Amino acid sequence: MKAKRTPTSEGPRTSTQADAELQHIERAIGQLRAMSQKPAGTLNVEYWHERLNAVCTDYVLVPAQRRRVDALRKVLDSFSQPQSDPTSGRKRTTNRLWAKAA
């Protein structure tokens, strides 16, 4: 069986490998964006921030990839902003939306 490659055992991963990881994260965040439009949508923003941090530390990134990471972080940060509740005039967080749906 082939051993899983780890950044610590063989050094940083290449920018080509980073592209595949960034594409995966971009697709996932696109799905999160779609989920956030639903009343019971829930987002695990911290997890995706951790994945982006891992890309920055485990891969050799070129400037364009660093800009992609920064853009993805901004999108994730926008999910962290409280959502407006038009019925009460209050801000609603994702946790409140989740609790209401449960």
Image: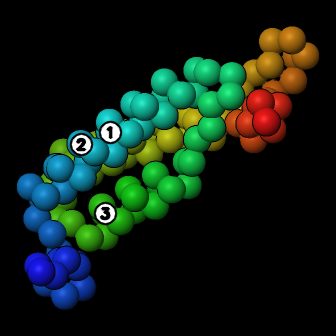
Q: Which residue is mark 1?
A: 26
Residue beneath the point at 43% across and 31% down: 31
Circle 1: element type: helix
Horizontal side, residue 65 vs residue 76: left or right? left
Horizontal side, residue 19 vs residue 36: left or right? left
Circle 1 packing at 10 Å, graded few (<14), some (14-19), many (20+), is some
Q: CA distance from mark 2 to mark 1?
A: 5 Å
Asked if residue 1 can be seen in this view, the reply is yes
Please say if the residues under marks 3 and 2 sit with CB atoms less than 8 Å apart: no
**Residue 77 in the image, given as x and y percentages of width and height:** 55, 41
User: Which color scheme is applied?
Assistant: rainbow
At label 2, the amino acid type is Gln
Asked if residue 67 can be seen in this view, the reply is no
Circle 3: element type: helix
Q: Which residue is mark 3?
A: 56
Please say if the residues under marks 2 and 1 sit with CB atoms less than 8 Å apart: yes
Circle 2 packing at 10 Å, graded few (<14), some (14-19), many (20+), is few
Q: CA distance from mark 3 to mark 2?
A: 14 Å
At label 1, the amino acid type is Glu
* 63 versus 56 height, above or below: above
* 16 versus 31 height, above or below: below
Circle 2: element type: helix
Q: Quadrant of residue 92?
A: top right
Circle 3 packing at 10 Å, graded few (<14), some (14-19), many (20+), is some
Residue beneath the point at 16% across and 49% down: 19
Q: Nearer the viewer, residue 62 or 43?
A: 43
